[in-house]
Amino acid sequence: MGDNGVVYIELADGLKRVMGNTKLYVKLLNKFKEDPTILEALIAAVQGADYEKAKGLVHTIKGIAANLSLTELYKQSVEFEAQIKNKEVKSGVPESFKTCFEETIKNIDKVIEQYG
């Protein structure tokens, strides 16, 4: 699911991770979606050069993305985490991460609409 060949949610893989329990998968997607403050906190920590806090937050997002098969968000989390660890966040990376996060949420909404 996604535009330009970008996969935001690997639905089949996500459902496999919860043994095909669609209700549980939708519940987990909803839980992730209900806490958008993690993104704001991450961006603020990066902007404030609080790399320890940023590292913890991006690591959390990465783990959730991996568990829910949020493919593009996971890929970008890995890259972002590496830059945060090196304390060298490249220009434009927080913005593109934010865009990816927001697109992931839009795709989560579509899945919830379809299966919720």
Image: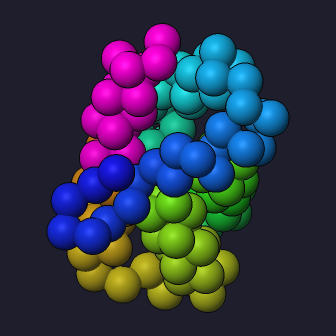
Q: Main secondary structure of the magenta part?
A: helix
**Residue 107 percent coordinates (x, y):** 34, 39
- Image quadrant of residue 92? bottom left
Q: Report whether 67 appears left or right of 99.
A: right
* Residue 45, above or below 85: above
* Foreground pick, 17 / 61: 17
Asked if residue 14 lies in the magenta stretch, the reply is no
Residue 31 in sight in this render = no
**Residue 59 percent coordinates (x, y):** 69, 58
* Residue 101, above or below 22: below
Q: Residue at x 29, y 47 (%)?
A: 103
**Residue 56 percent coordinates (x, y):** 70, 55
Q: Residue at x 76, y 44 (%)?
A: 17
The scheme the figure's colours follow is rainbow
* Foreground pick, 34 / 20: 20
Q: Which residues are magenta?
A: 103-116
